[in-house]
Amino acid sequence: MSDPDGNEQLGSARAGVPQPPEAAEDTTEQKLRVSHAARTRSAASRAAAICHYIGHHSSDEKSAEQHEGGTTDEQISWKSAHAARVAAQAVAVLAESSPAPAADSRCARNASASAAQAAQMGQLHDSSSELSVAACRAALKASQAAAAAAGAGGLGENETLNAKADAAEADAVAAAKKAGWMLPGQDLPEVSTGIRSPDLMSMLHL
């Protein structure tokens, strides 16, 4: 296309050229990566905060004290630390991989499931107080929503399921704060991912 003086108007011509499918796909995957990664980090932070809370509010004198189901403080601390470590591994896998909605959503699912396990330990530690029960229930709902978003019906690309998972994660964070497990502006120590074998990393990012 040319202007009255015969100069070709490249900008206008290019504006009408469709975006290459590959570029559009990359943009979509990047946007989904941001969403899934944010949810993964949030769940990992919940797990780490609960682990820190349990460790901070436990003592050697009470390590043998038994809670519901005969669980001891030592067992609760170990299980919450394990949950925090697995959630941290999911974050690490995302940082080391290329965007892939289905796989990214599974990392978010794994982190949320680990955070739910940590929440169960938090509830046991707090002797099933009203706020801890509510926080654990919210964590389980977040885990279920994350699993649905990553499942066969969504594969990490269903906007409705992703939005529900995001909302459930936000609710879980709010409930954890009410229970005292998370504190605003809390500076948590870094959680070690432990020894990460190739098989484990592949499993986390299936």
Image (cartoon, grey):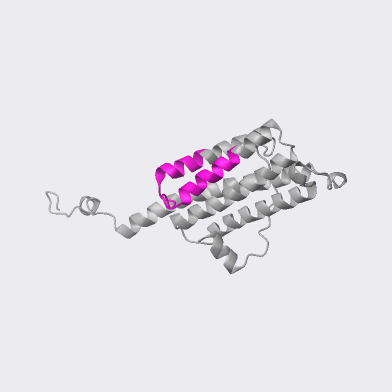
Is there any visible trace of residue 147 in the rendered image?
yes
Residue 39 magenta-drawn? no
Is there any visible trace of residue 35 in the rendered image?
no
Vertical placement of residue 85 versus 53, above or below: below
Give whichever of 39, 188 is nearer the camera.
Answer: 39
From the top left corner, tell me how far across and down residue 95 is, in percent.
Answer: 54, 58
Residue at horizontal 61%, vertical 53%? Answer: 87
From the top left corner, tell me how far across and down residue 128 is, in percent.
Answer: 71, 36
Residue 154 magenta-drawn? yes
From the top left corner, tell me how far across and down residue 150 is, in percent.
Answer: 47, 51
Residue farthest along the right direction in this orientation: 61
Vertical placement of residue 206 versus 139, above or below: below
Left or right placement of residue 13 versus residue 99 in this view: left
Give whichever of 171, 6 is nearer the camera.
Answer: 171
From the top left corner, tell me how far across and down residue 23 is, in percent.
Answer: 34, 57
Give whichever of 108, 65 is nearer the camera.
Answer: 65
- What segment is highlighted magenta in the picture? 138-167
Residue at horizontal 77%, vertical 42%? Answer: 67
Residue at horizontal 52%, vertical 60%? Answer: 205
- Chief secondary structure of the magenta span? helix
